[in-house]
Image (cartoon, coloured by chain):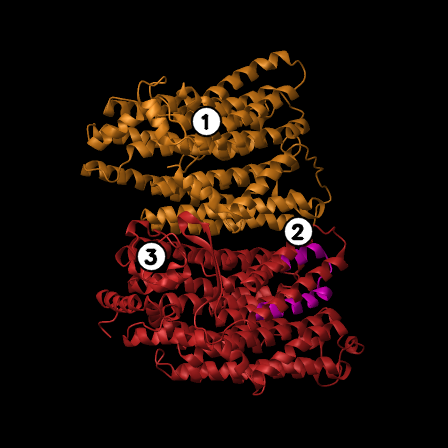
């Protein structure tokens, strides 16, 4: 529990600490933030080591009452998927921080405060087990990111910052309405009709110490944002309502991903943000969207997910091809990488909505991959930009002659992004496409066929760009004396390369982390579709067999009974 | 005897206001004594109200029901007392910020502080009223003080215009209010709200008159909270009034009108009445308030988008906030009222805070009030612009600032009352409002500074700003403390 709290709060503590360091003391500010960031990473490694892979369900759960009358709590915990993303956050953050040392030249104090606040928000999103808390973390991120783009960005930064802000807020406010509606419906309808969902589930009752299984229904919460309770109860929400809730959540997440046609903010935000901002944006922020799709849309509204899977998958496939095609005609390297994100995230969404083991596992590993390889690409673009203050492809050419080490690094990132077997990108793309191919929900090969073309396009635009920038004669005299990678840049790039190769060669290390939680989600979805009783829900399985055994069996029968009575299982 | 203790906030504030007025005569040229006296009297009143707030309702009921000294004209304890604290707090923040402001305007008079005390007296009477007559007296006492305060700069054209406009329209709205009360009296035969409540329950009333009467009262109160379509006075008045007073009027004044809304709707609107006509009429009335609420937030936020003057922009935003607050009246359940209590408290911090900063930057005769005057302010005044950004984010409702929790709670209340559409409208108007709130931040942070930067002397206003900023962050991180407490008040 302590490591989880530390992972979450160390960045916040750091950002408060920075407030008290006098302006102009830049060296101290940089060192403190780096130290905190690295310690956070080390703590998250401890978290990984003490995480039990075979355990299926949430671990390190912390539950504190926050607003009693709304049943909102400070509830956090980790399962395999969130652990992976937390690790990604704590890993990318120090690296982008090192990149900040070169990229940020003004108002440094404010920058590092914002930066650590951003890390706090991102970690929070991945660990929150309460919708209210989740929403707060989701929105906390807005403020630092808005300032990072708006204050330290490029020429068009104000436009990009406002666009980023408004797009995100539009989505998230509708999600807020959905959260409130969900909390209201669970409390006023579902729990009133079937209180046994809460009262006879020993794992959930741990969250409500003042309730006992004989408590009168009147004392049950009338409003709740407890994720675990909602997850148990939400299948009893009628499909019509589920559909609306699904859409409201999906809108918010799809804007963040971003899914075609909601992607327009991304290119501007990426192009205008400073290098570390882009790295964080591509590396972690976009993953919040895909994480939300798995955690909330699939898990809370499974029935609605089946309905909308094909529409969203179509959008994902269009995004894959469209992003690639648009990337092909970009003249600005950073914009090109930004559009490649649209394409790569399409694979992730396709994998998620295939609702198969392979698809979701692939999606999770692809989130990590994209964070690493695109993050590294942005770092490389940043290195170029700092030396030449331009990102236009035509300005470069023949850099391989003056910057051989840089060329090698760039090549690794680029090939990982293309999906070369042996590097990480291949694993993710292969798994998601396989998942979409096998999927019974999508039930068509067309998604895989079109999606696979994205891999070819990726090879086209990235290789062409690489060729134009790196090979040939040095045409521009300004490029003749460019220095190669500095020591600091090595420090930022090498760790990423290690993981790129590691995932590419032996992905099992990473796949096994999220394996159990993915399997239990897919089992739940499969069982719902096939009309089996939902015995495999992790939280119930987790209950230790003891005296309560008899009650537990009873509970499962009850649950099956409730589902049948509400018409969820009969027609299958 | 107990009743004297329960009514101590009312007695104290009235006495202090009158003493302060007499003090003017004896203090000669010095302004400080009156100011400090007003501050101290507000603190004492707040403490007295806080004390009565914690007296259990049963004790109060049993002590007052038998032959009460004030003939059941007054309510004691719980939410009434809580609102007293809010009003006193608003007064304290305003007075602290005023001294500096009046100095820089070279316009300090002792009457200013006394008028604030009188306005608060009126508000406290509103929140304690259990009788339409008391309610009316409270509203008038408050309004008259406000009319004078709005025209405080009596040599400035804008200020005089603002006072005149406020007075004429306000008097007109008061007419509606009194006429409405008269009709309610006609329908029920009493002005005592608890009697009206029981008569509405039993159906022993003339329904048509009651409905028309309530409609007229709603119009009168909607004017006081500046709700659409009775909001037109607000921008001009808020612009012309001294800036700290604008903050005061738009928070405490608005909260006072809202508590009047709560008191009236609690006693006269009954959705579960056994008599179908009354239930139906109640539904209609609630629906009308919902429409007013929805259109108020939309109009306020949309018009605020195009404002170039910061004071006017925040004036329109305060109209929009009246719309959000009315959601609690629409919900018409304890959750909604508690939501109003919470939001009114937070709104006080953020709105007064924002107006204090505007007052600091503003210079004599309405200078430095344009958005462009705020360009690059963060370079010269990092702390001040940091606070302003905090207030703006809170007004926009971005967590973890407390403004968000207020909205969230009101959304919950409205959805529980089956007003999903109202919540969706509120969300849409919030999105619209983001644009101008972050617009000010763009000016302060992202634009290059002007050559001509106003000099700022903080003085006592710093205390107000610190309290406001702390309140927003504290209740943002621990909203439960206030929300759970407010829920118990109803």
Co-location on one chain, circles 1 and 2: yes
Q: Which residue is mark 1?
A: B123
Q: Which mark is residue A186?
A: 3
Q: Chain of mark 1?
A: B
- Give the label, 1 or 2, closer to the camera: 1
Q: Residue furthest front?
A: A547
Q: Are marks 1 and 2 in contact (CB under 8 Å)?
A: no
Q: Which residue is mark 2?
A: B447
Q: Are marks 2 and 3 in contact (CB under 8 Å)?
A: no
**Residue at (66, 32) in percent of width and height:** B460
Q: Which residues are magenta?
A: A87-115
- Give the label, 1 or 3, closer to the camera: 3
Q: Residue furthest bottom?
A: A421
Based on the picture, tell me whether residue A114 belongs to the magenta stretch.
yes
Q: Position of residue A421 (x, y in %)?
A: 56, 88
Find chain B in the image and tell me its colour: orange
**Residue at (60, 44) in percent of width and height:** B388
- Is A570 left or right of A355, judged from the image as shown? left
Q: Chain of mark 2?
A: B
């Amino acid at each position: 529990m302590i490591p989880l709290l530390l992972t979450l709060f160390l960045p916040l503590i750091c950002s408060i600490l920075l407030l008290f360091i006098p302006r102009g003391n830049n060296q101290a500010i940089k060192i403190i933030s780096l130290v905190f960031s690295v310690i956070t990473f080390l703590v998250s490694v401890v978290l990984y080591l003490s995480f039990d892979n075979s355990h299926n369900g949430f671990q390190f759960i912390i539950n504190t009452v926050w607003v009693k009358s709304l049943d909102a709590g400070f509830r956090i915990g980790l399962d395999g998927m969130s652990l992976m993303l937390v690790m990604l956050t704590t890993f990318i953050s120090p690296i982008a921080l090192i990149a900040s040392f070169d990229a940020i030249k003004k108002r440094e104090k404010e920058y590092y405060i914002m930066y650590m606040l951003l890390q706090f928000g991102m970690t929070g999103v991945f660990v929150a087990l309460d919708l209210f808390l989740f929403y707060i973390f989701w929105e906390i991120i807005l403020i630092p990111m808005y300032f990072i783009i708006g204050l330290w960005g490029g020429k068009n930064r104000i436009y990009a910052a406002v666009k980023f802000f408004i797009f995100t807020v539009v989505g998230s406010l509708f999600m807020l309405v959905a959260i409130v509606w969900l909390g209201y419906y669970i409390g006023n309808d579902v729990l009133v009709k079937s209180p046994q969902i809460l009262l006879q589930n020993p794992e959930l009752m741990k969250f409500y110490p003042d309730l006992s299984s004989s408590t009168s229904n009147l004392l049950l919460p009338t409003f709740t944002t407890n994720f675990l309770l909602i997850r148990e109860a939400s299948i009893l929400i009628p499909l019509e309502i589920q559909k609306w809730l699904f859409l409201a959540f999906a809108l918010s997440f799809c804007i963040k991903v971003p899914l075609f046609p909601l992607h327009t903010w991304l290119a501007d935000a990426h192009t205008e943000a400073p290098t570390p901002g882009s790295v964080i944006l591509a590396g972690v922020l976009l993953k919040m969207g895909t994480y939300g799709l798995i955690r909330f849309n699939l898990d809370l509204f499974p029935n609605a997910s089946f309905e909308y899977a094909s529409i969203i998958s179509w959008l994902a496939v269009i995004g894959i091809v469209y992003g690639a095609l648009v990337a092909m005609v970009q003249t600005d390297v950073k914009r090109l990488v930004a559009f490649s994100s649209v394409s790569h995230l399409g694979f992730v969404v396709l994998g998620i909505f295939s609702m198969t083991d392979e698809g979701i596992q692939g999606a999770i590993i692809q989130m990590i991959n994209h964070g690493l390889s695109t993050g590294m690409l942005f770092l490389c673009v940043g290195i170029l930009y700092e030396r030449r203050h331009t990102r236009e492809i035509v300005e470069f050419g023949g850099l391989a002659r003056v910057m051989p080490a840089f060329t090698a690094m760039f090549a690794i990132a680029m090939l990982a992004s293309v999906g070369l077997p042996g590097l990480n990108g291949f694993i993710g793309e292969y798994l998601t496409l396989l998942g979409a191919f096998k999927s019974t929900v999508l039930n068509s090969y067309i998604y895989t066929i079109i999606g696979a073309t994205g891999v070819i396009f990726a090879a086209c635009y990235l290789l062409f760009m690489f060729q134009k920038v790196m090979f040939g004669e040095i045409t521009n005299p300004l490029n003749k004396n460019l220095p190669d990678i500095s020591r600091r840049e090595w420090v930022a790039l090498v760790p990423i390369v290690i993981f790129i190769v590691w995932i590419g060669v032996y992905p099992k290390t990473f796949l096994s982390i999220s394996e159990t939680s993915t399997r239990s989600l897919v089992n739940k979805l499969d069982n719902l579709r096939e009309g089996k009783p939902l015995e495999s829900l992790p939280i119930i399985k987790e209950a230790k067999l003891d005296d309560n055994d008899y009650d537990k069996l009873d509970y499962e029968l009850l649950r099956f009974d409730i589902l049948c009575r509400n018409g969820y299982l009969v027609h299958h | 005897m107990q009743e004297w203790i329960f009514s101590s906030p009312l007695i104290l504030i009235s006495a202090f206001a009158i003493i302060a007025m007499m003090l003017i005569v004896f203090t000669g040229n010095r302004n400080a004594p009156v100011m400090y006296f007003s501050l101290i009297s507000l603190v004492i009143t707040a403490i007295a109200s806080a004390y009565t707030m914690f007296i259990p309702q049963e004790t109060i009921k049993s002590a007052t029901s038998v032959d009460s000294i004030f003939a059941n004209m007054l309510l004691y304890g719980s939410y009434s007392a809580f609102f007293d604290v809010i009003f006193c707090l608003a007064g304290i923040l305003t007075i602290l910020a005023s001294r500096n402001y009046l100095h820089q305007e070279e316009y300090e008079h002792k009457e200013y502080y006394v008028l604030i005390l009188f306005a608060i007296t009126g508000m406290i009477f509103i929140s304690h009223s259990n009788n339409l007559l008391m309610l009316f007296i409270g509203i008038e006492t408050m309004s008259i003080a406000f009319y004078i305060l709005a025209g405080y700069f009596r040599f400035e054209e804008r200020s005089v215009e603002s006072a005149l406009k406020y007075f004429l329209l306000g008097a007109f709205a008061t007419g509606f209010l009194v006429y409405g009360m008269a009709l309610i009296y006609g329908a029920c035969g009493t002005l005592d709200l608890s009697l009206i409540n029981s008569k509405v329950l039993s159906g022993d009333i003339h329904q048509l008159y009651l409905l028309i009467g309530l409609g007229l009262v709603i119009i009168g109160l909607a004017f006081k909270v500046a709700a659409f379509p009775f909001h037109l006075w607000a921008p001009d008045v808020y612009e012309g009034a001294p800036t700290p007073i604008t903050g005061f009027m738009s928070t405490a004044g608005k909260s006072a009108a809202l508590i009047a809304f709560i008191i009236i709707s609690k006693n006269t609107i009954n959705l579960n009445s056994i008599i179908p006509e009354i239930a139906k009429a109640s539904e209609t009335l609630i629906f009308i308030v919902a429409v007013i609420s929805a259109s108020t937030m939309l109009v306020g936020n949309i018009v605020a988008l195009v404002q170039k003057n910061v004071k006017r922009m925040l004036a329109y935003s305060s109209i929009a906030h009246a719309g959000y607050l009315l959601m609690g009246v629409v919900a018409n359940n304890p959750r909604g009222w508690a939501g109003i209590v919470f939001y009114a408290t937070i709104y006080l911090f953020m709105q007064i805070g924002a107006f204090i900063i505007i007052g600091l930057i503003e210079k004599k005769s309405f200078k430095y009030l344009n958005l462009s005057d705020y360009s690059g302010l963060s370079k010269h005044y990092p702390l001040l612009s940091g606070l302003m950004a905090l207030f703006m984010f809170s007004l926009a409702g971005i967590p973890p600032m407390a403004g968000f929790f207020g909205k969230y709670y009101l959304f919950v209340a409205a959805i529980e009352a089956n007003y999903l559409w109202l919540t969706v409208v509120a969300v849409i108007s919030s999105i619209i409002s983001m644009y101008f709130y972050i617009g000010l931040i763009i000016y302060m942070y992202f634009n290059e500074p002007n050559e001509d930067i106003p000099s700022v002397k903080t003085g006592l206003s710093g205390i107000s700003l610190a309290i406001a900023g702390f309140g927003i962050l504290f209740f943002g991180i621990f909203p439960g403390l206030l929300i759970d407490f407010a829920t118990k008040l109803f």
